[in-house]
Image (spheres, helix red, strand yellow):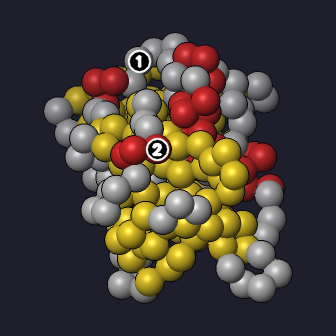
Amino acid sequence: MRSLAAACVVLGLTVAAQAQSPTTRVRGTVERVEASALSLKTPAGDAVMVALAPGYAVGGVVKASVADIKKGGFIGVGARPQADGSLLAVQVFIFPEAMRGTGEGHRPWSVLPESTMTNATVAETVSRVDGANIVLSYPGGEQKVTITADANIIMAAPAQVSDLVPGAQVAMSAVKQADGSLSANRITIAKAGAQLPL
C-alpha cells in the first residue's frame, strides 16, 4: 500500500503534494543509480542529480484505457477548459479503491497553464469509439469531462527499489534545498509502456 500511496502523491494529485514548498517537478530517464542519489536526464536533455531521502518510497504507474474507468470509480483528471464549459482531459489517474477520497474536489492544476485538477467519483460514463464523456461528482459540484485517445490514462501499480535502474522513466516532486540541490522521498516509475505523469 505504501507504494500505491507514493505513486498517488508523486503524481501531484493531492492538495498536500501541491502545497508543499519549495518543490519542483522532475521527470526523466535514470542514467545512474547511487546509494543515495539518482542521476537523471530530463526530456529537454538536462542532467539532474536528485538526492534520495532516507527511507524513500517508490511506486509505479502502468498504462490504462478508457475501459478501465468505471462508473463509481474514483479518479483524478488533469484537464483544460473547453468552449462549452466542459473539460478536455490531458491526464487521467485511476486511484486504487484504498485511496478513494484523496484530494477530493476541483482546483487549479499548476502543472499546465489554465488547467484544472479534479479528484472525484465517476457518476456517469458514455463511451464511444474514439474516447468517452464522463461526469465527475464531488461534494459541492460536478464536472463534465471528455477523454480522447490523446489523454494519458494511467493507474497505480506496485514497484520496488530494484526497479530504479538505468533507462527507467521516473517522475517526482523534489524539494529544493537552500543550496539549490534537490531531494525526493517518493519516486514514481513508469512501467509496462506507461507514459510518465505530468
Residue, x 23% and y 29% (percent of image)?
128
Residue kind at label 1, given as amino acid type:
Lys
Taking the image as drawn, is residue 85 in sight?
no
Most distant residue in the left direction? 129
| Residue 140 circle label | none
* Residue highlighted by disc 2: 161
Which picture quadrant has residue 5?
top right
In the depicted structure, whether residue 59 falls above or below residue 166: above
- Please name whichever residue, 103 or 121, is drawn nearer the observer in this view of the structure: 103
Residue, x 52% and y 43% (percent of image)?
58
Taking the image as drawn, is residue 170 in sight?
yes
| Residue 70 circle label | 1
Q: Residue 11: x percent and y percent?
A: 55, 49
- Cα separation, mark 2 vs mark 1, equals 31 Å
Q: Residue 112: x percent and y percent?
A: 55, 66
Residue, x 50% and y 79% (percent of image)?
48
Q: Residue 37: x percent and y percent?
A: 55, 66
Residue, x 82% and y 81% (percent of image)?
178
- Please name whichever residue, 123 or 182, is drawn nearer the observer in this view of the structure: 182
- Judged by depth in the image, the label closer to the viewer, 2 or 1, is 2
Q: How many discs appear?
A: 2
| Element class at badge 2 | helix
Which picture quadrant has residue 118?
top right
| Element class at badge 1 | loop
Query: Which comes sooner in the sequence, label 2 or label 1?
Result: 1
In the depicted structure, whether residue 1 falls above or below residue 81: above
> Is 157 on the left-hand or right-hand side of 120?
left
Q: Residue 194: x percent and y percent?
A: 30, 46
> Is 117 on the left-hand or right-hand side of 46?
right
